[in-house]
Amino acid sequence: MKNKWIKAKAYFSHLTLKKAVNFLLLYLSFVLSRAIKKPVLWGYPTTLSIEPTTSCNLRCPECPSGLRNFSRPTGMLSESLYEKVISETKDYLTYLHLYFQGEPFLHPKFTDLVSLANQSGIFTSTSTNAHYLSEQNIKKTLDSGLKQLIISMDGITQEVYESYRVGGKLSKVQEGLGRLLQIRKEKKLLYPRVVLQFLVTGKNEHQIPELKDWAKKMGVDELQLKSTQIYNFENGSDLIPSEPQYSRYVPDGKGKWKLKKEIENKCWRMWQGAVITWDGRVVPCCFDKDGSHEMGKIGENNLEKIWKNKKYQTFRNQLLENRKQIEICKNCTE
Ligand code: SF4
């Protein structure tokens, strides 16, 4: 069976009538908002990203966790805050990504966090740099009920891999991935589905054929070739791939670079879900890495209230009016 069907099976097995109706309401209110150019919001978030930690073992050049240049505080998600969010959202949440910034496996209770969401009937996913896939961690992950594990690996030789994943060890990633697939097979389990994610840059695009062969040989469930967001793309960067299909940017004909996709005054993500940082800040999406648009804080208010508060609605209104007035939205392909 194809990976997308196996994933869909897990997703739909967690779906309830209440969740489906909520999703429909969100979608209808999004369509209506676009038509009348005013934010109407029915329903509650159907997806969430929750950040287990901002700590990271690597130093990737386009990532604030790696560069240690957050202005927001860094730390670990507390179990009490997490339990509060899960108990408030479990009736309408269809997808939980336990990741935002940082390396989730550095959270000492990471697999317990997954288990709680899984037992609450929520489809769970995470992203990792795969430096902590020891036999013990793999067994705990398999037991947790995690449905999808996205492994970032952006090179097929150590030299190319570490040119972006600074401080990373490719052999560790490859061994961990192989070990996980082997143990999952021995236990005759289907989940977590293993997605190998390769951020395509100008420095690694020549390795794609070799990567495809390796992924096939290993038996990964899915290979995703993802375009990379570059912070200061206007003047070009050696991280921009030469192959246009893997690039978010194109030359503008005047010596500068621009986004390939025309920006439209819409964003489904603002109706679909939110991101919660380790200390409970609710931010609009994963592009707001430093939490510049904090909509509210869990603990001071519950998510349902924050989701529909004035600040959030003003943000949605700005998107519908003119998305370019919001800095983070100028470099977004959504
Ligand atoms: S950056 Fe703006 S347009 Fe992109 S997902 Fe976030 S809110 Fe939406």
Image (cartoon, grey):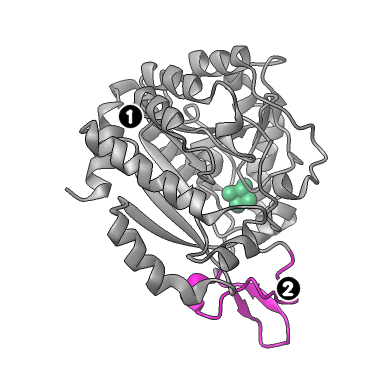
Q: Is residue 109 above or below residue 228?
A: above
Q: Secondary structure at mark 1?
A: helix
Q: Residue at x 35, y 63 (%)?
A: 214
Marks 2/1: CA–CA distance:
41 Å
Q: Evaluate whether residue 308 shows in this view.
A: no
Q: Residue at x 57, y 13 (%)?
A: 84
Q: Evaluate whether residue 273 shows in this view.
A: yes
User: What secondary structure is the magenta-colored segment mainly?
Assistant: loop
In the image, is residue 246 part of the stretch drawn in magenta?
yes
Instruction: Specify the amino acid type for callout 1.
Output: Ala
Number of other residues with Cα within 10 Å of mark 2, as a class: few under 14, some 14 to 19, many 20 or more? some
Q: Quadrant of residue 140?
A: top left
Q: Which residues are magenta?
A: 232-260
Judge from the rendering whether residue 334 lies leftward or rightward of residue 150; answer left or right: right
Q: Position of residue 154 (x, y in %)?
A: 52, 61
Q: Position of residue 5 (x, y in %)?
A: 22, 45
Q: Is mark 2 within 8 Å of ligand 1?
A: no
Judge from the rendering whether residue 327 lies leftward or rightward of residue 101; answer left or right: right
N-term-proximal mark, 2 vs 1: 1
Q: Is residue 145 above or below residue 169?
A: above
Determine the residue located farthest toward the left in the rendered image. 1
Judge from the rendering whether residue 39 lies leftward or rightward of residue 290; answer left or right: left
In the image, is residue 318 part of the stretch drawn in magenta?
no
Circle 2 is placed at which residue position? 234
Q: Residue at x 38, y 39 (%)?
A: 148
Circle 1 is placed at which residue position? 20
Q: Is mark 1 within 8 Å of ligand 1?
A: no
